Amino acid sequence: MENKKISVIMSVYHEPPDWIAGSVESILKQTYQNLEFIIVIDAPDNQRVMDCIYSYQKKDRRIIVLINDKNRGLVYSLNRALSAASGYYIARMDADDISCPDRLKLQRNDLEARGLDLAGGQITVIDENNRVLEKRSHYPVSCRETSRALNYGSAIAHPAWFGKREVFTALKGYRDIPACEDYDFLLRARKAGFRLGNLDQICLLYRYHSGSISRTRKAEQRLCGYYLRGQYKRGRGVGEDEVKAYLLSEGAKRERERYAQYQKYSHAMLAYKAEKKYLRFLWGGMQIMATAYGRRTAWDMFFTRAACRKRR
């Protein structure tokens, strides 16, 4: 199999330097070495982040650093990285996650062996202190399973994406869909006829931290997801302005408040499970089911699993 170049793209904002270091090193130490690592710094005023990235660039010439003139957000940063990419493949990476040593090699081989265009993989969820919260995810594997699972949510973990550059070129990169640019991309990719799937092995340690769930981004992500899903089920796409208008509506405001409550209980449940406090874990589950989002999430999980019963 030809040793084609992989372009790994990553946006860095205000992540702690030790998290950034772990993320960067996990890419540089990959068993698949024919790569370029494009890092976009979206916090030009953060000297600690700048120093951390430049220290690695001095050691490894495969790192390409791009600096935004100001904070412009993830979509802008990823699209800028894509425009600078020269690899045959594109791989995503987040500044607070850790890739497994064989991730790129395994994903490349799996993608070509199964004739996929874009794929992810299974992940292990860790917290701020690298403690394991969830040992293994259950993302669908086959193209058929993944396509069906997209009817109920994002079926490929964004930080674990690995695909052919032509997919990103054909779709003209990411659209500015608030907090849901990845799900929007996957729905558009499926509609365009690209083959999607997941590696049936763990390829990434995904960091789930308390600071991330307190932001409105999580609520908007869920809101946008339901909205996009509804529109695509009706056989129509949706414009960026249409989504933004929906997020400003009163209905969306109420949904954010409900989701904040659900997310609070959800994070607590993961902590109880890791600490083996099973009674508190069950109590947290009852509190979650008392919320509207909890019941909706349960149904989504049920239908997603039903769509993915047959492996491969």
Image (cartoon, helix red, strand yellow):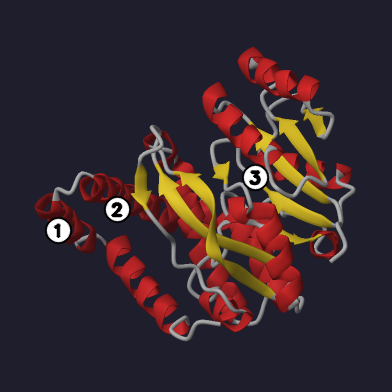
Q: Which mark is residue 93?
A: 3
Taking the image as shown, residue 125 lies to the left or right of residue 16, namely left
Binning the other alpha carbons within 10 Å of mark 1 as few (below 14), some (14 to 19) or many (20 upward) gives: some
Write down the quadrant of residue 268 in the picture.
top left
Asked if residue 249 can be seen in this view, the reply is: no
Task: Give the alpha-carbon distance from disc 1 to disc 3, as whole Å.
Answer: 34 Å
Task: Label 1: state its secondary structure.
Answer: helix
Instruction: Confirm or deny contact between disc 2 and disc 1 (CB under 8 A).
Output: no
Residue 252: where, in percent of width, then height?
44, 55
**Which residue is at 70% across, 56% downward?**
105
Q: Amino acid at mark 2?
A: Tyr
Instruction: Confirm or deny contact between disc 2 and disc 3 (CB under 8 A).
Output: no
> Label 1: which residue?
282
> Label 2: which residue?
262
Q: Nearer the viewer, mark 2 or mark 3?
A: 3
Asked if residue 273 can be seen in this view, the reply is: yes
Write down the quadrant of residue 55 in the picture.
top right
Q: Amino acid at mark 3?
A: Met
Q: Amino acid at mark 1?
A: Leu
Among the two numbered marks 2 and 1 on one chain, the one whose residue lies closer to the N terminus: 2
Task: Label 2: state its secondary structure.
Answer: helix
Among the two numbered marks 1 and 3 on one chain, the one whose residue lies closer to the N terminus: 3
Binning the other alpha carbons within 10 Å of mark 3 as few (below 14), some (14 to 19) or many (20 upward) gives: many
Residue 239: where, in percent of width, then height?
70, 62
**Which residue is at 42% across, 59% downward?**
136
